Amino acid sequence: MKQSKKTAICLLCSFSALLFGLIIYIFCRQGTHIHTALQSWFGLTLPTLHFGGFMGKLARNWLGDFLWSFSLCFLLAEICRPFRHRIGLAILVPITLGTFLEILQFYGVITGTADIWDILMEAAAAFCAGIILKRGNLL
């Protein structure tokens, strides 16, 4: 596969996962910083989609984290293309960053709810992205 096609696929995966995560964050959560900004800047009040059961909880609480970590892995794989160990960087950086942010939430340094499931979802996303990158010959 040509390098330009690999780059296009990595960027498409990264930006589509980021966009889908943002859509979930906006429409499946309430009272976020994005909601406050849209309300104060543009006077917009967006509807919140409510899903019940485990799937609703999965979408509200963890799918956004999964998609953002997945997105970061593909973007890092592309940015780190010249480096020899880029797959390791693409997997390790999102897991480390996600864990660090959860620790900061736990200690109240940044707002949010510290949750071990967020870390597990980010790690799962990083490993899924790593498998796709490796098996899809995108590196």
Image (tube, grey):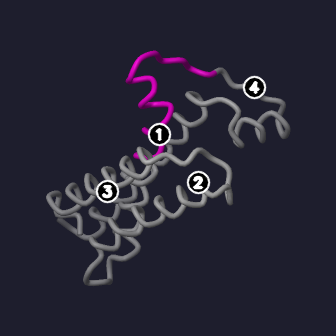
The local crowd at label 3, few if under 14, some if 14 to 19, many if 20 or more residues have their Cα within 10 Å, is some
Q: Residue at x 37, y 61 (%)?
A: 73
Horizontal side of 4 relative to 19 (left or right) equals left
Confirm or deny contact between disc 2 and disc 4 (CB under 8 A): no
Confirm or deny contact between disc 1 and disc 4 (CB under 8 A): no
Query: CA–CA distance between discs 2 and 4?
Result: 30 Å
Nearer-N-terminus badge (2/4): 4
Q: Nearer the viewer, mark 2 or mark 1?
A: 2
- What amino acid is found at the position of numbered circle 2 in the picture? Phe
Q: Nearer the viewer, residue 36 or 52?
A: 52
The vertical placement of 15 against 94, above or below, is above
Q: Nearer the viewer, mark 2 or mark 4?
A: 2
**Residue 106, label in figure:** 2
Q: Position of residue 121 (x, y in %)?
A: 37, 47
The vertical placement of 28 against 114, above or below, is above
Residue that mark 3 sits on: 9
Q: Position of residue 103 (x, y in %)?
A: 54, 60
Query: Which image quadrant is residue 78 in?
Result: bottom left
